[in-house]
Amino acid sequence: MEAMAAAVAERPDEIGTVQSSPENMVQMIFLLSILFLVFACACHCFVSLRRRDADRRQFNLDEWRIAGLPTPSFPVRLCDAAGCGCGPSCAAAALLVLLDRLAVRPCLRKSLRAMEKAEKTGLLSAVLVDAESRKLLVQRIDDLYDDIWRSSTLTVTSKVLNYAGAAHCLTNHRGLLELAVEKGAESESIVKPIFIVSLPRTGTTILHRTMSLDNDRWRSFHLSDMLCPLPSLVARHDQEGRRLLAEKAAEEFGAVESLFPGWTKLMETMHGFRFDEAEEDLGWYDAACGHGYFDVLMVMYPEQRSKVGGVSPLESKECARYRYAWLHMIMKIYQAADRKETTIEAVKGTPPVYGSVPSSPSQCGIIAGGDAQSFQENGTTTELTNLFGNSQPSADLESVGNKCCEEKSWLCKDPNHAAFLPELVEQFPDAKLIFIHRPPGEIVASMAKLFECFTCIQHVPGRRGTTSAEWGMEALKRTQQFCDGLVGFTRSQEGTSLGLMSGLDRRIDLQFEELVADIPGAIQIIYNRFFPDGPPPSSDAVRAFEMYLQENERNRRGNQSRSLEEFSLSEKDVQFSCYSSMLLAAHLT
């Protein structure tokens, strides 16, 4: 103790300085202020989060009435509620600017260069690559940015994800264009494709997915094709390749489930996502447009309705012609892959597997894979390796691939076709069409509920366009658009091979109630009418149909309650007299 006292006595000035230094006091006050601000910010975020969660639950009880409403993950809710402390608007603006400059615009410039190169080759349709199409691509990205920026309905996370998705779509746009040029896909011919062109919510999905299991007769696109077209282009009959592709798509889609737990389960009650099964064509329009096609029309419908004439440019006839030209190109790319892979199997002495029944119903219809192209980005260069190999098989062996491809028809489906049938037939002049008719009063409420379920994780409840009444009006407008398209097309085709009563070998009209009562019987009618000289479905295909229908019985995965009253509509609002009088009188036979 005496030693310590002596030491203090020797340094009195130094000790006093430490105890009373004004600089240290300032530092301490500054640190305490920082801690207080952090604490206040955390409290604000917590309070905002709790209030937003409570508002969302109450809004669902009052408006959406969604059974099993998913709750976004904590990071998503925190970002949406408080913008990570800097406010939702500020956070969204900063992230959008960064994404635009660092990701989307560079991808757009690469896509434009790919379009210019493709135009010089003369190998692709001009509507896909000419100066006007390049101008429209830039305009679509500009519109997307503006719509997201000014949207008051989208959450912060939704704004970021939708604009970040444009970079992915543009990468696929460029890669598929380069692949089409590289492999000469334009030399392929798409002969007599089959399109299911009905109104939404009319049983088109179950019909499409069931029919596609007959691998001897049909070729169709799986959801995994559209989600992961690059770097692995997978031919139709490589079962192992298709399985791996579906696993890859499920893994990438799992990111959505991690951000929004329970959303995929919710969608199973309305329209389930099956990566190894046939899916609607509209998935390909994401790459065509350079951004999400259906997503923009749904999650940003208030912005789309505010455009000139109340119609989005994405739903113009010009855009429809562009989309169908793109779909035509995609079909050619995959058909070329199927043809070459079939020839390669013949060279190896191993016949391709068609019509085999997998070990479980959920695997039915997985029929593709094979060699793929490598798609790598290196600055401004893109390398596409040889997809089809360098060997030149004999004419006899090549005819094996040609014969297998010619015997199989494309089977496609998209409810949006109903509004653009003249443009569809213009692109596919020998197409055959399947219509399914259902009273519109049963469709509108179901469609509105689908829209609510699809968008509930991306919208701020209570903002413009989120109430049930607003969704009911949007579903009503879309149904009117589809009904007008079907009626107008049917009238224009009177007496032709696509007429209601005259197009017996190119047009089939089914009634919804009769379809769901006997799907195998409806499929048999389709085969008899479209392929009168061809064989019926094989026993393996019939067994695959039965297995799939048993596994996917109607309402087995649950259902969402919906009624016209829920969406502030009445029976008077959903008469659609022209459609009903013309098409609800049509019958299976």
Image (cartoon, rainbow, N blue to C red):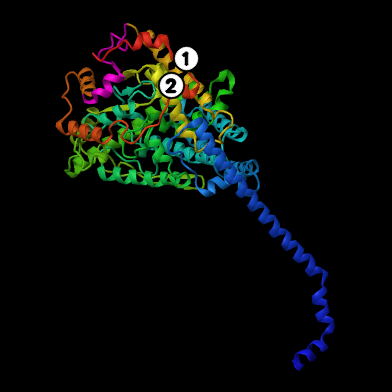
Residue projecting furthest to the right: 13
SS for callout 1: helix
Residues marked 1 and 2 touching at CB (< 8 Å): yes
Per the image, the residue denoted by label 1 is: 573
Mark nearer the N terminus (1 vs 2)? 2
Residue projecting furthest to the top: 495
Per the image, the residue denoted by label 2 is: 444
Residue 125 in view (yes/no):
no
Left or right: where does residue 209 sit relative to residue 540? right
Q: Residues within 10 Å of mark 1 (few under 14, many from 20)?
A: some
List x then y, in percent, for residue 484: 44, 13
Rendered position, 444 above or below 85: above
Q: Residues within 10 Å of mark 2 (few under 14, many from 20)?
A: many
Front residue of this view, candidates 174 and 537:
537
List x then y, in percent, for residue 275: 34, 40
Amino acid type, mark 1: Asp
Residue ID at (66%, 47%): 86
